[in-house]
Image (tube, grey):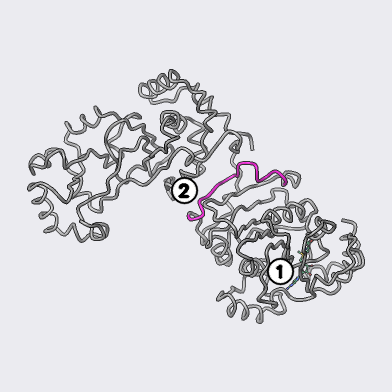
Amino acid sequence: MLRNTAYLEQVGEKHRKDHGQFFTHPKVANFMVHWVLGSGSKSIFDPAFGLGAFFDPVANEYGIQFSGCEIDPTILEFWKYTKHTRRHETNFIANEDYLLSWDKVSENIVCNPPYMRFQKFLNRDKVFRAFLEKLGLKLSGYTNTASAFLLKSISELDGSGRLAYIMPLEFLNTGYGTIVKRRLIEDGHLSSIISFACEKDVFPDVTTSVGVILYDASRFHTYVDFHTIKSVDLLSTVLEQAPVSRVPIDGLDPTSKWLPYFQPYTFTVSSKETVSLNYFGRFSRGIATGANEFFVLKPSVAKRLGIDNSELVPCISKSSQVKKPVLEDADCEALVKRDAPILLFSASTNHSKQAARYIQEGEQKGYHKRFLTKNRTPWYKTEHRDPSSLLLGVFSRGSYKIIRNRSKAINLTCFHGFQPNLFGMKYLDHLFLYLASASGREIASLSMRKYGDDLDKFEPNDLNGALVPSPKILDELTKEKIRNAILHIEKTGETPAEINYLFARLKEPA
Ligand SMILES: C[S@@+](CC[C@H](N)C(=O)[O-])C[C@H]1O[C@@H](n2cnc3c(N)ncnc32)[C@H](O)[C@@H]1O
């Protein structure tokens, strides 16, 4: 740090500000450099070299090929005379403007880019022209140099390399940031963003939030992890901890604000005790018929039409049809007795005369021309599905609906349905109890999307990435405990305290 102070004393505040010179904390630089080296390549490029904060951690490491560029000859000269390395050559850092030197490819990139508004940037017009010509991107006048550096570096990253950028994160919430966010996620390579709740330690004079962006071109990421850390000392282990939010990459909207993903909840989820739900199976959307008025029949209507039971499948067509936490065949029979619309017309191509008549009637009414039906062959053949063992309400206000389905009823789009994999088959009751428990609800809710008017919505992919107890914890539930707990829930509608207690340990204070 002494070197940085000596440099600043020599050049003065104006020079530093004009060049956007802020220096990376050695612990942060060390973390970023070693993360990119995790790609397996020993080559590193730093487009905004400064006094070599990213070079220092590997300066004396054998076999590293470090290169970079730096626009300011003054800082480069200062570095040459004060560098902390046994290496004598210094020409691996070019004295040039990164935003105007194009057509390089780098295996790994680390950077703390200069942070200035483009309004103040001398070469602004040339840079804008180059971005349009080379990347087809029209930068907004509000863009800052840091975002432009990031966009350019992503475009220059080798297909198997990694990129780590430390920069102000305000672009995650602003309009000009949309193109940057879009670029970060469009190829599925954004891995994590770590926000520093301790930004004053990292950049003593910053006023915005600062964070590290980790982008790995060698892998496709289904989820992006948003971490928050309270001290730079926690950086070395942050990626082993559960993130504040884990958001499916295809659920991230570049036009919306991303900073709320870092907002620490009052707890974090223990990564040692949890796995993703898709370890046990998957939730998927319920069956979309494309015309429920045609496909979902009341028993009295099916009888009048003479349609046989072999061409009908019991189905839950509305969330309100399920009033109890456990759905049995007897409950479906009760719905049939009440003449509720719970029979899905499921004729095969080889159907009865009565079904043929009903299909014809449907065509006369134009049901075969609806958006979904016209794209199905034959239009009246809905998807075949096995009944899902767990049903989870798509929309909720306050608390979601979770149902243990033991009936033969399949579900339409009012519920997402869970199909276990081979391993998950024996954990259906356990998962039901977890999702019905107080902590399960809080943890699953981290994966919910918030809509206006207090309305919450689950997307199947969000749910599949939600953290649930590991098999080790679920195995603590004996058959007897499970039976008693489910009976208790059926009787009282409440999850027993013992179950809430078991799963509460997944939550750790933030
Ligand atoms: C935020 S400092 C980071 C320095 C160093 N890498 C670190 O992490 O401590 C950004 C550096 O980029 C340099 N710089 C500014 N504009 C540049 C440009 N257009 N091309 C290359 N370097 C630039 C500045 O002079 C400054 O040294």
Q: Quick one: quadrant of the C terminus?
A: top right
Most foreground residue, 339 or 428: 428
The answer to whether the beta carbon of the residue marked 1 is less than 8 Å from any atom of ligand 1 is yes
In the image, taking residue 99 as reference, residue 481 lies left or right, namely left
Of the pair 164 and 159, the residue shown nearer to us:
159
Residue type at the position of mark 1:
Met
Local crowd size for mark 1, using a 10 Å CA cut-off: few (<14), some (14–19), many (≥20): some
Q: Are marks 1 and 2 in contact (CB under 8 Å)?
A: no
**Earlier along the polypeptide chain: callout 1 or callout 2?**
1
Give the residue pinned by disc 2: 450
Please report the bounds of the magenta region as a residue range. 236-250
Counting every numbered tag in the picture gives: 2
- Ligand 1 image position (quadrant): bottom right
In magenta stretch: residue 248? yes
Q: Which mark is residue 388?
A: none
Which structural element holds mark 1?
A: loop
In the depicted structure, whether residue 212 falls above or below residue 265:
below
Give me the residue at 76% from left, 68% from top.
68
Circle 2: element type: strand
In the image, 352: left or right of 386? Answer: left
The numbered disc on residue 116 is 1
User: Residue sitting at 68 percent across and 67 percent down?
Assistant: 106
Provide residue 448's location: percent of width, then percent of height: 47, 45
